């Protein structure tokens, strides 16, 4: 038997509130607090390491830059 219940978001649930705050920081490009990261994400000097970019993120950035360059070239070309 499957029971589905709706809940009104994460309001008032402490752990979920903290997760929401961390999500917002990540969306703004801010780094995580080093002491909150798992030890596998620390370098020997105990500083956070940088994860490699994903293939899809690299492709998306490349396509965005190509599209911007295309618009620039088309705007400046004689008609």
Image (tube, grey):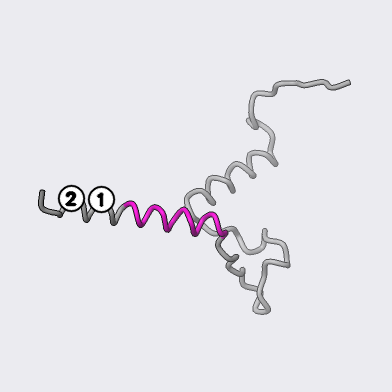
What are the residue bounds of the magenta stretch? 54-67
Q: Which residue is drawn at 54% across and 54% down?
A: 56
24 on left or right of 10: left
Q: Are marks 2 and 1 in contact (CB under 8 Å)?
A: yes
Mark 2 packing: few (<14 Cα in 10 Å), some, or many (20+)?
few
SS for tag 2?
helix
Tell me if residue 57 is in the magenta stretch. Answer: yes
Q: Horizontal and vertical percent for residue 44?
A: 68, 79
71 on left or right of 33: left
Residue 45 drawn above or below residue 11 = below
- Quadrant housing the N terminus: top right
Q: Residue at x 30, y 53 (%)?
A: 68
Q: Horizontal and vertical percent for residue 72?
A: 23, 54
Question: Which residue lies under the disc numbered 1?
Answer: 71
* Dot label at residue 75: 2
Q: In the displayed orientation, state which residue is furthest to the front.
A: 79
SS for tag 1?
helix
Residue 1 drawn above or below residue 42 = above
């Amino acid at each position: 038997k499957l029971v589905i219940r709706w809940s009104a978001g994460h309001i008032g649930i402490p752990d979920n509130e903290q997760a929401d705050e961390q999500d917002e920081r990540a969306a703004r490009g801010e780094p995580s607090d080093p002491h909150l990261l798992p030890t596998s994400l620390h370098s020997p000097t105990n500083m956070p390491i940088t994860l490699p970019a994903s293939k899809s993120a690299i492709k998306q950035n490349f396509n965005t830059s190509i599209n911007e360059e295309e618009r620039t070239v088309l705007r400046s070309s004689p008609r």
